[in-house]
Image (spheres, rainbow, N blue to C red):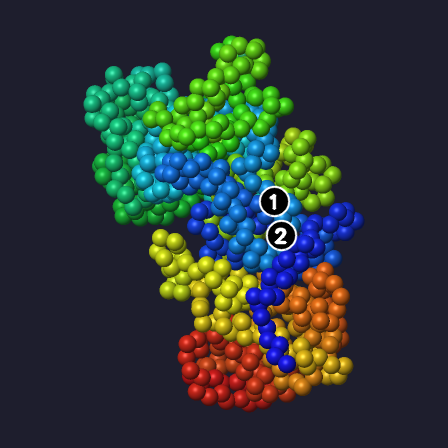
Amino acid sequence: MENKYNHIDIEKKWQEKWEKEETFKLEDNFDKKKFYCLDMFPYPSGEGLHVGHPRGYVASDIYSHYKRMRGFNVLHPMGWDAFGLPAENYALKTGINPNTSTAQNIERFKKQLKNIGLSYDWSKEINTTDPKYFKWTQWIFIQLFKKGLAYESIMPINWCTSCKTGLANEEVVAGKCERCGAQVIKKDLRQWVLKITKYADRLLEDLEELDWPSKIKDMQINWIGKSEGADIDFEIKGLKEKVKVFTTRPDTIFGATFLVLAPEHSLVNSILDKVKNSKEVEKYIKEARKKSDLERTDLAKEKTGVELKGIKAINPVNGKEIPVYIADYVLGFYGYGAIMSVPAHDERDFEFAKKFDLEITEVISGGNISKEAYIEEGVLINSGDFDGMNSKESKVKITEWFEKKGLGKKAINYKLRDWIFSRQRYWGEPIPLIHCDKCGTVPVPENELPLVLPETENYIPSETGESPLANLPEWINTKCPSCGGSAKRETNTMPQWAGSCWYYLRFIDPNNENKLVDTEKEKFFMPVDLYVGGAEHAVLHLLYARFWHKFLFDIGVVSTKEPFKKLKNQGLIMADDGTKMSKSKGNTISPDDIIKSHGADTLRTFEMFLAPFADSAAWNPKSINGVKKFLDRIWDLKIRVSKNTDDKLDQLTHQTIKKVTEDIENFKFNTAISALMILVNEFKNKEAINKKNYISLLKMIAPFAPHIAEEIYSEFKEGSILKSEWPSYDEKMIIEDEVKIVIQVNGKMRDDLFVKTGSSEKEVKEVALNSERIQKWIEGKEIKKVIYVQDKILNIVI
Ligand code: ANZ
Ligand code: ZN
């Protein structure tokens, strides 16, 4: 009888069965322990998925299966982050309404995800562009507005010359638009801005309680950029105006030999008539406006600047007259857009002083300031009464001196800026505000939400920088909700990040028409226990979502301080030549093709086996066949199942259960699969396999390869294996005498491994070849021979 593993039939059969029987539907059971396992939901692009995309989805799916089998009520949803520029740019090109193209893309994505056999509860599906969803995005905005956390401001914003829209700082990469690569310039525009800075301290402090990769936490810490120091006022000789500076080094004040203002500093314009070289100054200001902040603060860049001739400042601690410059290395929107320059102890100031031949006064001992700035803290010199004090103490003392004189005070500064929240685009949530001449800015009444997008055929933004909505008078003209007079709608839309700031809450209760989320359900399911996605979201989405969550906490909508308890980032899957996969390079591999040729189970298992989850890895078309063979082997073993017992196999099975359980808990999927491969090889060497051991194997492989596991299991047992209980192990069975074996490659020690006493050469070799440390040395090499001294040493000769 020919009974071969036929992945195509099996995968189709089980996907249909799961769907029909709603196998993965969230249980309406609040007595069980919950587990909320969330993926970063995708933007449904027109290109569909390549094999790199599902890596995170497969991992979270494995974890969800595992948790279900451990008795948890698992919420594992999926949805669409579907507002965004690509759909709008596509509409501009083709005239096709973004609604239409988005719906098509979603359908395609969904089909691709279903083919992978991911265990989402599709009854929880959401789409950020669905008015039933963005009604609540708008509702949250109105609450922010009512609490004074959304405000209007004329701001020089980052303006993409090609997309013709404002960008957040985070969307500008090396002075270019993150989306289209065009030059980004500064442009003054009326903007809606969210006061994320009000939450800066809480966003910092609460990072501590999160189980997140430290790299991501550090990026948030740096982005928020809290620094402590002092504000100090400098008098300008002969003028009323003072210049306030922020410094982290008040201990160096005696070395402040000049002031530098940012070109956009407000003082510059107001005193221009007193500046002798005003023409030169004006020209410099104009040039500076063309540069991005990044270019301006680039350490490597040659410093530029212009002296404000005829203007002098006074150093408050010693009364010395010092020159005043404008230079673009001082940013207009950090601190006060002005600095006291201490060339002896700050690198940029040092370079600047060298270039313009300015005085350099050493005030911290220990450096060699004829050569370079000495930026360490240390002992003060040339600092009057403060000589001999160390930096730490003198910072306090000098700040106190300023406080007493009323010339300064202790201060804290943040790099974090308020979040520019408006976009001049069509395909986004309309900002639900109305402008009335009499009443000012009034929110759309909450019972009139959602405020939907009007139909149009014209997606071209207006040249003035307003959104395409500004071209639709029937939409703009409305009644003031407060006085009933004629009024105008806000034409800005929200940025792409808005919908993803709170979607994890809506998954809990996606169809609630009266509330953003039901309070009881929210209490039960929040926080998200595990969040899986790309590390590229370290400071964008992950900071914005935390901000909104904290706001929702403050207004009583959510019960937890933080939304995402544990975060895991996946590494990228690269093309087999090691470069990034992209449609434009033509090196993408479609999961659909792999699913046809090898099966979804093989794809899933292979993506986890490829490398440690957080590492990037190149797609390896050859080794996928090895994974397919591994599943074939599991299939072929089923005819050997019997009542026979075998102590050695029992023991190995128990050891494997322990290893795989721990590995899944720790997201070490690749080593979990290695352990299963070893077990399967042992099984293969036996004529008969005890049924209990074989079922344990099936249960362990089920989260990785659910279709084949279901199919085989159904020959032995009733019900879905994915609803069965995770196998347990007996500690007593596992203990055995172990010895440490030294593993050498060409006579050099490369690893040591514990194996059971008396292991055969074959057994030790198998373990050794699975060690990552050993693989590094033998990869791609031919093994010439293996020398084994039992219980002592294994030498691999290549
Ligand atoms: C004097 C000084 C002496 C400084 C010294 C540093 C070293 P962080 O830590 O990033 O907050 N600064 C202040 N405002 C600035 C602006 N708008 N653009 C560019 N630089 C600015 O850095 C704070 C320090 O950055 C401040 O302390 C100031 O230079 C500079 F030996 O003041 B310092
Ligand atoms: Zn009114």
Question: Measured from the top left, where is residue 732 in percent x and y?
Answer: 76, 75
Badge 2: how crowded within 10 Å, few (<14), some, or many (20+)? Answer: many
Q: In which quadrant of the rendered view does residue 292 lie?
A: top left
Q: Is residue 216 left or right of residue 250?
A: right
Q: Is residue 472 left or right of residue 12?
A: left
Write down the residue under mark 1.
125
Q: Name the residue located 64 percent from the left edge and 81 percent from the top edge.
A: 1
Q: Name the residue located 59 percent from the left edge and 26 percent from the top edge.
A: 449
| Residue type (three-letter) at the residue carrying disc 2 | Tyr
Of the four image quadrants, the one with ligand 2 is top right
Write down the residue under mark 2.
120
Res 329 visible: no
Question: Measured from the top left, where is residue 92 in percent x and y?
Answer: 38, 36
Asked whether disc 1 touches disc 2, contact meaning CB atoms under 8 Å apart, the reply is yes
Q: SS for tag 2?
A: loop
In this rendering, is residue 699 above or below 319? below
Q: SS for tag 1?
A: loop
